[in-house]
Amino acid sequence: MTLAELWVQQLLNAVSIGSMYALLAIGLAMVFGILRLINFAHGDLLMVGAYVLIYAVAAGIPFWVAFLLSVAAAALLGVLMERLAYRPVRGQHEVVLLLTSFGVTMLLENSAILAFSPRTRPFPLPEALSGVYHVGHVVMSGIDLAALASALVLLVGLNLVVTRTKLGVSMRAAAEDLTAAHLVGIHLDRVVLAAFAIGSALAGVAGLLWAAKSGRVEPLMGFTPVLKAFVATVIGGLGSIGGAVLGGYLLGLAEVALQAVLPPGLTGYRDGFVFILLILVLLVRPHGLLGKAEGDRV
């Protein structure tokens, strides 16, 4: 492999991983932008979506139909989460919202353990995603290609929704000033519900890609992805959708770069170095790369 091919290979690996982080981080950023809520239960949406898929496939439903059902299930769970858990405490102190998100997380994870058992289940990877493709010495798996294509389509679609539709304008207005948005006639319940539904659907897609890449499904599988997505949103700027995308791809690039440059004895501590990077970013830009201070908000 030439040096140029090595660089291309590492860049493709970084973009593939970053695509999953970006799709997850968008949901966190959308909800935080409107409600100032860090929804750590966001990671359990991908877990529920993955279980819906493996049971649907086991019931004889074609994989791609099961895929759509699992994404719909994640979106529905996000809507129920907002309606039953977060709406009653809306407007309360941020600590109340944070503790509520931890409570929802514990409820979902322990319910999954009781319903599905704590044992790991294999992910039913279809043949289209299990293949490996070569361009010279550069290697791409079907999962990596699916991650790239999904991120491209969904990010373009989300950008069109946010910038070209009445719902998108309402969401941006609510993110700027929730009270002012309400005073000018924006239906806040619908806006918040839409943010949860869209973010949860994106989490469902990212979760299935994550499960396909790891090859397994388990009740606690959402913890690591949501933690990485939270790091991405902090790097990019909490509440900024563009920042969430940027942070996701930068995090993917950082992980691949660290994997390449760290000595073999330190590669197991890669995540620790990622958090050191997060601290350095916050020392320079406390509000993230694209975030704004509360005092700067209009």
Image (cartoon, grey):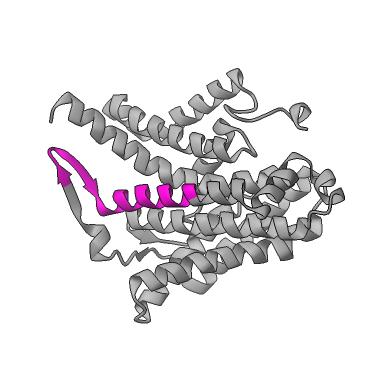
Residue 269 seen: no
Estimate the x, y position of residue 258 in percent, counting from the top left: 35, 28
Q: Which residue corresponds to the image point at 68% horizontal and 29% vertical from the top-left? A: 292
Residue at horizontal 61 percent and vertical 57 percent from the top:
105
Q: Is residue 10 left or right of residue 54?
A: left
Quadrant of the rendering where the C terminus is positioned: top right
The one of 93 and 187 positioned closer to us in this rendering: 187
Farthest-out residue, front = 164
The image position of residue 119, as x and y in percent, is: 41, 65
Image location of residue 254, percent across then percent down: 40, 30
| Quadrant of the snapshot with the N terminus | top left
Whether 108 is among the magenta residues is no
All told, the count of numbered labels is 0
Is residue 222 placed above or below 17 in the rendered structure?
below
Q: Which residues are magenta?
A: 134-156
Q: Is residue 178 left or right of residue 265?
A: right
Above or below 73: residue 39: above
In the image shown, does 80 or 34 lie closer to the viewer?
34
Most common secondary structure along the magenta stretch: helix
Q: Nearer the viewer, residue 102 or 166?
A: 166
Q: Is residue 249 visible?
A: yes
Q: Is residue 146 magenta?
A: yes
Query: Residue shown at 58%/50% (left/top)?
Result: 27
